[in-house]
Amino acid sequence: MKALCSIAAGSVLAVAGVFLGPSHATAASGPVQTGAPSVAPGHVGATPYSPQHLLPQGSISGLAPGSAHYLYADEGISPGHDGAADNIEVFRLENGNATNVQVYATTANQQADFYGANSLAYVPPNKTHGACLIQADGSGKVDSYTIDPSAHTISAQASSVMSAFYNDPADVKIAPGGAMAIVTVAPSGTYLSGLEAYTIGSGCVLSAAGSYSSSSVYFVSSALMGDRILVTADYLNNQIDTFGISPSGAFTLEGVTASALLYPDGVASDGRDVFTGNAYDYYPHALTQGGLVRNGQVSYFHSSPAKDGRGQNSAAVWYDGQFGNLVLGEQSTASLGIFGAGGHMTLRQHVTLAFNKAQPTDFAQLGTTLLVDGNVSGDIEACQLDAKGSSGCATVAVLSNPTGYSDGIAVD
């Protein structure tokens, strides 16, 4: 597994009896091996993996009979490195099956993906625009696409806007109502990391609004709490930052809280509390943390940090609003750790994914069905959630081009 950072000398931390390792990190000039913080599995120059041939082995049992939904998945291809175009693939989900109905070639260059980030977001139609898809484009842009209202396939690219930071847009969230996209921009080379807001206008056309950055931050993903509060994890400074967002898209830093874990990565929220993953594959088990957000500060629960002793390298995180589950993607063990959310972050279940090489990176949810982007070999799995965790996972779709590091999923 590859990473973008290396450990620098530092003190040793411990929280609630959990060993937390060195307390500082610095950027490295190239990938390093296991034992370093694990931001991303693949980027230009990384050793290509050998994809395994997968076939769908299960059904999507949690969807109502006769109902149809659509899954959008980014293949995660870098044209300059992989010699092929990046595509967004569209699957029709109906009667328990996932049917590929479109492979849409994009102009994106997905040269790096980040375990805790999701590069795709679906935008429902509103009075200003129809249904849209927003893509964080690794070439330094944010792209938008129109969705055909009948076929639910991609009609055309509506806009492509250069990031103000000229680097690596990684994660997209949509504000309630679909009027604004919030993009987390990861650092790349000498370019800055930061946050950007884009208004979504008629025809799904993006317009740059506000932005925030500083020379020291390292953001990978964020979570919205309503339409005016954003929480993001500062990966290398080991802190959780809370921002206010104005109606015009301006960001105001409301507060900074020291992370209880080194290398916080993915971020999820239930609207009141915030949770993060932990991108560090040197820990012998998967870790997560959570707390109440108030006045820009995070007050950690007594049960935080929490661990799954059978998992490892837990960057990605998802909040399940159906059953109050906190789902932790465990990249080094092809598994999920499912915890109770809120003040009692008790491990409910350790769930093994169907593909034993999967690196659960991104999530989307339809009712009781959790869709999991396995990141490699084109693996897309469906897990049925319940109040105790999950009744199991199965590969339900395989991307047409399985050679990339799949870079995001979204559903309508």
Image (cartoon, rainbow, N blue to C red):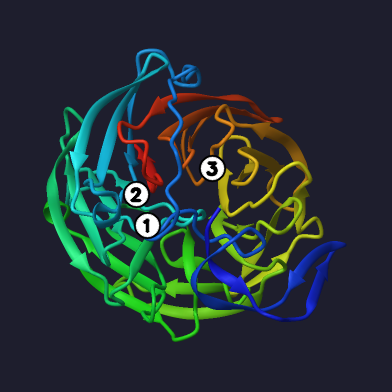
Mark 3 packing: few (<14 Cα in 10 Å), some, or many (20+)?
Answer: many
Q: Residue 324, relative to residue 249: is it above or below?
A: above
- Residue occupying image coordinates x 80% and y 55%: 303
Q: Kindly identify which residue carries mark 1.
A: 172
* Location of the C terminus (image quadrant): top left
User: In the displayed structure, does residue 273 sit left or right of residue 102?
Assistant: right
- Label 3, label 2: how far apart the Cα atoms are: 15 Å
Residue 82 coordinates in the image, percent (x, y): 29, 49
What residue is disc 3 on? 360
- Residue type, mark 2 in image: Leu
Question: Is 261 left, or right, of 362 in this rendering?
Answer: right
Q: Is residue 142 visible?
A: yes
The residue to which callout 2 is attached is 120
Residue at the image position 71 percent from the left and 35 percent from the top: 350
Say if mark 2 contacts mark 1, CB within 8 Å: yes
How far across and down, in percent of the image, does residue 240 sit?
A: 59, 71
For label 3, the SS is loop
